[in-house]
Image (cartoon, rainbow, N blue to C red):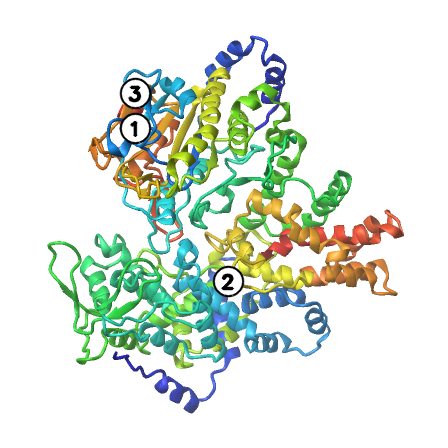
Amino acid sequence: MRVLLVTTGLLAFASSVLAAPPDAQRLADRIDAHLDAHLKAANATPQSQADDAEFLRRAYLDITGRIPATRDVYEFLADTDPNKRGKLIDDLLDTPRYASHSAAIWRAALAPETTAIPEARVFRFGFEAWLRLKFRANTPYDSLVRELLTASLSTDAENPTPALRRPEDPNPLAFYAVKEAKPENLAAATTRVFLGVQIECAQCHDHPFGKWTRDQFWNQAAFFAGVGRQGEGVFAPIAEDLTVRQITPGMGKKPVAALFLDEKAPVTRRGDTPRLTLAEWVTAKDNPYFAKATVNRVWGQFFGRGIVDPIDDFNDANKPSHPELLDELAKAFADSGFDLRFLIRAIGRTKAYNRSSARTDASQDDPRHFARMAVKGLTGEQLFDSLVQATGYREGNGRGSTRDQFLSRFALSGKPTEPETSIPQALGLMNGKFINDATTLETSPTLLASCETPGLSTAERVESLYVATLGRKPTQKELDRVVKYIDAAGKDRLPERLGDVFWVLLNQAEFRLNH
Amino acid sequence: MVNSQLVSRRGFVATAAGSGWLPTLAARAANDPARKRSCIVLWMSGGPTQTDTFDPKPGHANGGPFKAIDTVAEGVKIGEHLPDVAKQMKHLAVVRSMSTKEGDHGRATLHLRTGNLPQGAIEFPVFGSLIAKEKEQPTADLPGFVSITPRGFGGGALSAGFLGPQYAPLVVGGAGETFGTEQTGGLRVEDLGLPANVPQRRADERRELLDDLEAVFLASRPGTATKSHNSAYQRAARLMRESAAKAFDLSDEEEKLRDRYGKNRFGQGCLLARRLVERGVPFVEVSLGNWDTHDNNFVQVKSLCQTLDPAWATLMGDLKDRGLLDTTTVVWMGEFGRTPGINPRQGRDHYPNAWSMVLGGGGIKGGQAVGKTSKDGMAVEERPVTVPDLLATVCHAIGVDPEKQNMSNVNRPIRIVDQSAKPVKEVLT
């Protein structure tokens, strides 16, 4: 069996070592300059900066995928360092949680079939494990993409590569398996996720808005022409025939050869996979799509909408809201050696990302101005992991677990800034066992601590629940209302009443949303 | 949608039941021009055998031991273990020429329930969610799609997909293995009731606290996210209220009627379906499992029919008595049929090539069998019907435009039913 050997990322690594470290604050200032000019032209009034607690919760949810722990809130609020927000962003990017949250996000982007198709769900674990390793090591994004596109596949059809050995083992082949190892599916995902181009519409007809033609779609598919699975189903093993360099779009059609999107012809050496040639073109520093598509995707993750939106639909009829900003971001990202953490460090330092999500002026309603922070829905992962953080619940995360049930029940669909809540979801949060246990003294670590720590006033007990849940202290008005609610019932009912307050906090929109 | 008019009508029904007033009421309900059409799907999980139910092959070796019996529809014969359904046949149309391609439970279930096979990242909604979106009244107390004792293969089989969670079904589960005679008939809406340790008064107090404390945040962040959160909680609370929760309480049904449906989960589920349709729920699904009869098919199918036959027949009659049948389309189907040939274990295996399903009630021209299979049952000889054909037929019966498009999660508009669909015109009124 011959397995391909792949070289990865050496050049990018060398260049990032030699150049001066890129300055995240400088890029953040440039971003704000572009946005401010746009706001001024639109005569829109931007919202002022979020307070520390609002910012802290948002940064935790966006970077680590869950709300901050109580001690993180108190430490951050007490910190007098004027640069503490920038430092927080840097620190969070170094945590293992950044890697696991990013893995979940990119898994959903690269292999949405693992959500959409029940039998493909088992691939989530190994694919996220593989992505986690990459994000943990801050592998340059271009290297990550090259590794994925050139993942080694057996070239011996008699002895194909298993798509799945042990589900938990790090495994990039999920990308191939859930796309049924079909050239057209792999090409569609590659251009959509890595280049922001939805060329798959051109699979059947010329693209309605863009310049893409059917032939161009099949030109892309031809890079994967030799890839195929041996047998049926998503678990079938996969092999690649390196001698196949053309693909036939359908019965009676002429075979089509590989061509890059810019119409140039690739040169693939004998014995190499055309995927290698494609990967090199896709991730080249001067590729006209790659860096833009990526910064736009990350931007969308943090702001709820892209500079081009939907984030993966670059076409002539869907223009960027801030074209110069997009260009400058893309260049800075490429110059940094495709360093995702650098990009996030810069985004996190902008005034725009630091704005409050509260609405103070009608001009802030147009999301294209980025005049206030968007209110975003939580993914199933973010919601469950935040509930765990707030309640002190402990459980493994195997298949069929409570976490797994939450992921399917609370999966986010549709636009991230327009999340919908269903009746069954509301019923589950109001009356379900998880929340009931979490708000009942005997089964709730958080409530127990709030209730039984000696020497605290009612107000202090209430504050501890606010901080654990919403990541902020209660306002005086809230405190008055809640303390009255508790004290009216008498001392012996303190656990029950504190449980009620905790229930209220966990059921609030402010908890359920990333704002 | 328990508005006061409906509530008073319901009270009326309760007192009038069994006293000879029903025909008048039925006429009134039937003539109510504002009455919305509904759909009840009886989902036979596992793939029911057509040869032993709706496409008998007497005289052929594949026919097996069951006899074919006459029905009230001339020339339409069905399996002997569905005698009560046979009496309802003038309201039912059998489609004997279902011809599909998937023989795997998971894929076939997805295909029948969404109208589509998996296509990459597209999260196809189940049919019930699509119909709920078209027919639901946003102010209704009850949701647009209720699934009773869901059974079925494929974890995502009940997903509202790209339509979003607000169109996901409200699930009514079976409580425990033993079937009691308690209020709900063993059926229970997940998380509808308060936890045992939370009495009503406490629930009201903390709910009031929630509304008070949340108000500032909701007002300061106007938009879909806060609006949808708030509206789901309001609707959930309305559903928990006695009047709405009453819809799920079978104890105010006549004991005799409950007996006729069958004192089992499926029978009571069918009764619940009628109650929900009566209250304006546009799509209800009741599942009956264990049709995957690879072994010992005939013993199993006879026993399944003893559950199915009285429940379904009583449902048809009950809908008719209440004037609901003309506006309620009833669909009976599973994910595929079973082999006409009998295997050595006296079983029948998966068979998508040629199988039967049944349509009835509102919008359906009953009393007929459409399509034909060969003598041995192996092949469709007349009028093959595909999955999109079938779903488009149901759309027409309940007055939904199958070509209407919804925006999908891949930013491509997708029709309720694929464009290739040709409704089975013969069965439509």
Within-10-Å neighbours for mark 2: few <14, some 14–19, many 20+: many
Q: Earlier in the sequence, mark 1 or mark 3?
A: 1
Crowd band around label 1 with a 10 angstrom C-alpha radius: few (<14), some (14–19), many (20+): many
Measuring 54% from the left and 34% from the top, which residue is drawn there? Answer: B265
Against B399, is A213 above or below? below
- Locate the C terminus of chain A by quadrant: bottom right
Residue lying furthest front: B344
Mark 3: give few (<14), some (14-19) or many (20+) Cα within 10 Å: many
Q: Is residue A101 left or right of residue B419?
A: right
Asked if the residue at tag 3 contacts the one at tag 1, i.e. Cβ–Cβ closer than 8 Å, the answer is no
Instruction: Give the chain letter at badge 1.
Output: B
Helix, strand or loop for disc 3? loop
x, y percentage for residue A287?
30, 74
Please state which amino acid type lies under the numbered disc 3. Answer: Val
Q: Nearer the viewer, residue A2 or B421?
A: A2
Instruction: Label 1, secondary structure: give it.
Output: loop
Does label 2 lie on the same chain as label 1?
A: no
Real-space Cα distance between discs 1 and 3? 10 Å
Q: Choose top left, top right, bottom left or bottom right for residue A244.
A: bottom left
Position above or below: B296 against A15:
above
Q: Which residue is mark 3?
A: B76
Tell me which chain the residue with mark 2 is part of.
A
- Find disc 1 in the rendering and name its residue: B56
Q: Nearer the viewer, residue B293 or A179?
A: B293
Which of labels 1 and 2 is toward the front? Answer: 1
Q: Which residue is mark 2?
A: A303
